[in-house]
Image (tube, rainbow, N blue to C red):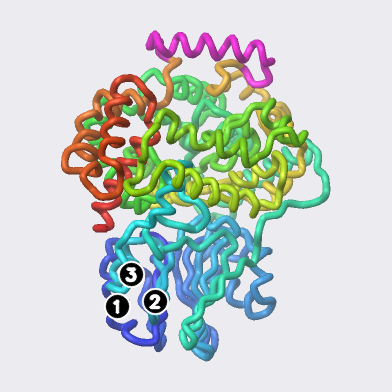
Amino acid sequence: MAGILGIAASSHSAEIFPKMLCFAKLFPWYETSVFGNFAACGLKDLGTCVTRANRTLIFYGEIFSAPGSTSAEAANYLLEGLEANGRSFLTRVDGRFQAALWDEGTQKLTLFCDQFATRPLYWTQTEDSFLFAPQIKTLLQHSGVKRSLDPEALVDFFTWGQYFHSRTSVSGIELLPPGGFFTWDAVSKKLTKERYFVFRGRDSETTLTETVEAIRHSILQQTQETFSDGKGDPETLGISLSGGLDARSILGMIPRELQKRMTSVALGVPGSADHHLAAQLAQKAGTRHFNYELNTDFLFHYDDFLTEMVRLTDGQYLSSSIVIPTLKFYREQNIRTLLRGHAGELFHMGKAYAFSMTNAERSAMSDGILSPKDWAFAHLQAFMLDGVNSDLLRGMPRIQCAELAKKSLNQALEETGEERENAIWKLYLSQRVFREIPLSMRKFDSHVNIRLPFLNRGLIENVFQLPSSQRMGETIQKALLERWRPDFLEVKNVNTGTFIGAGRIRQKAAGLRHRILAKLNVPGYQPYEKMGLWLRRELKPLVSQLLLKDGLRDRSIFDPDTITEVVHSHNAGKNHTYLILALLILEKQIRFLEI
């Protein structure tokens, strides 16, 4: 798995490390470095190891703000900056990376990552050692690491649809947080957890014009500069395109001469609205375009795709696995760098998955009438537990689960430092972005190099200074496209069914029309996936096999009657799509991790 791995131990590191490396060597590793009680390695393509005096830095990733383009230059840049300025230097670094710094003199190991932790790095402690790796199963090669599920983490996953904080499903194994700067003393066996950066936003106000300028700058920085000075072939640049706002905003800001040399790919079922609208955008841009279809072959091999998704993410991510079959396709089309619109939801929280809120709800929070804690507790869990009226986890009553989940949620909200509607934005940034985007990117990183123009600290700080009313719908993207790509406004927004900037009444009418035509199976109006329908129809045998027949139902984790009721209820027409997906992923995870 792409990243770095290693162990610092008072003894036996030479014995344990080869076991970790043996599992990880499914991939080409850069090198093995052993320094007394510390051993580590990194992946070849973006990994390196540099040493100055008695300090060794193991590095994996990219530094966009560093001079030069090689991993060795990036690693030296980090090491020199840390030696000259300490950890505060990292606040000025822009990139996607993870690193381990071993000081032979002090016998201390420091792990750190970029400000958004965009490349997952797991860690754990045993009685006399500290281990880290990009994959949980690598850590489980150490016999001192327990193979047991964390009940409180499962409460979060099956209440909110994701793990909160730095927890994982495995007891004792955690994720390095954004801006993490953790130091383990091999002599005292003590771990110091620090953060060199915590997102707070800026106090100064900004304007919509300044924001769209910042967005354009970030997009240009991660595309045009990627191929400047002969760094790469523009024809290997691709973009995941849809009929929504974020991908079209990125495509629209790319220089037109580059658009005509790049490739766009839209994912969806045959006749999906995203296919229809993405093709229109691609035609205007002049890209080489493909509509990748989720057809009967996808459903026939879905078990394999689900298994692969869990392998790539250790099952720590609630995903439908629909992008897995496209990964090979990107490579076949010679795409080496792929642009994606993740984190763009922060610009339009009215459409942000489980975090979506209405303008009325936002206004009520802004006026202090509605508490963010009350909104989040009532709203987020509905996507998972709506209609489940019995105990889900065995030995843990529903009321106890609710109390634990609420405590976890309230802690996350308190850590945002906000009391009104901005608490929801920062909750999305600190929990959803941190816990889901890096794992989503891990799937793509296995085949292509990812660029995330919206996940930029300066850009996000700028957006947070806009009035919350301008961060709800199409305001930001409309202003962006009006200035630089007005022809993209002629293509409807798939999320509203009408043109960007249309009024509320027109949006409601268009949404109603879209839903009616979708139910009539009219081409061009279908959703990009039909997971709920597939789970009760084509994938019904797989659901039965993994959850009911010698599967999750018979393990000592869940109430077996509740599992049976959830599956039967979904087959009868109740929507338990996300809950069933979460259950399938956990069953696959248990098998993969051998818990």
Residue located farthest toward the bottom when viewing the structure as drawn: 105
Mark 1 is on which residue type?
A: Ile
Spatial CA span between label 1 and label 3: 12 Å
Q: Earlier in the sequence, mark 2 or mark 3?
A: 2
Are the residues tagged 2 and 3 within 8 Å (C-beta)?
no
Q: Residue at x 41, y 28 (%)?
A: 387
Mark 1 or 3, closer to the camera: 3
Q: Which residue is mark 2?
A: 7
Residue 74 in sight here:
yes
Mark 3 is on which residue type?
A: Val
Crowdedness near tag 1: few (<14), some (14–19) or many (≥20) residues, C-alpha within 10 Å: some
Q: Which residue is mark 1?
A: 16
Spatial CA span between label 2 and label 1: 8 Å
Q: Which residue is mark 3?
A: 145
Spatial CA span between label 2 and label 3: 13 Å
Q: Is residue 472 above or below residue 558?
A: above
Mark 2: which secondary structure? strand
Residue 470 in sight here:
no
